[in-house]
Amino acid sequence: MQKSQKDFEVMEFYQISITVAIVLVILEMLTGTFILLGFGFGALFVGIVQFLLNGLSINRDLLVFAIISLISIYLLRRFFKSNSDEKKLIEEDINQY
């Protein structure tokens, strides 16, 4: 029995981007560094842009991914950074002795 093109479902580019975003957020739950969460936000925004603009554009998608990822990583680090982290680093510096 030969299968035709109609028998296979192919994921759209925006669906792949959103799936990657979900995987990155799940992996972030295992690490707790807020880096993968920023990349997940970038991938999510790429998926939204691909859905709204109907398709894939490598240059546009890479630019959106880079900008959104950098902004979200910066904001997440700034928001979740505690002052005790800096004090702990200063107190436990090996070059102090």
Image: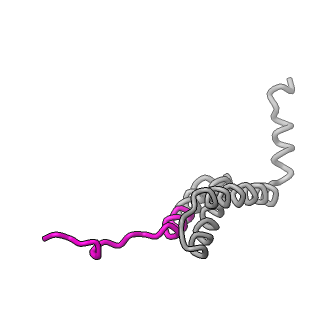
In this rendering, the answer to whether 63 lies above or below 2 is above
* Percent of width and height locating residue 70: 73, 54
Q: Residue at x 62, y 55 (%)?
A: 36
Outermost residue toward the left? 1
Q: Residue at x 68, y 55 (%)?
A: 66
Q: Dividing the picture into quarters, in which one does residue 61 lie?
A: bottom right
Label tally: 0
* Percent of width and height locating residue 17: 54, 64
Q: Residue at x 77, y 55 (%)?
A: 74
Left or right, residue 94 beside residue 20: right
In this rendering, the answer to whether 51 lies above or below 61 is below
Q: How is the image coloured?
A: one colour
Q: Dividing the picture into quarters, in which one does residue 50 lie?
A: bottom right
- Nearer the observer, 91 or 69: 69
Left or right, residue 16 beside residue 47: left
5 is within the stretch colored magenta: yes
* Percent of width and height locating residue 42: 65, 61
* Percent of width and height locating residue 60: 64, 60
In this rendering, the answer to whether 65 lies above or below 13 is above
Quadrant of image for the C terminus: top right
Left or right, residue 36 beside residue 68: left
32 is within the stretch colored magenta: no
Residues shaded magenta = 1-21
Q: Residue at x 59, y 59 (%)?
A: 29
In this rendering, the answer to whether 71 lies above or below 18 is above
Quadrant of image for the N terminus: bottom left
Left or right, residue 9 beside residue 96: left
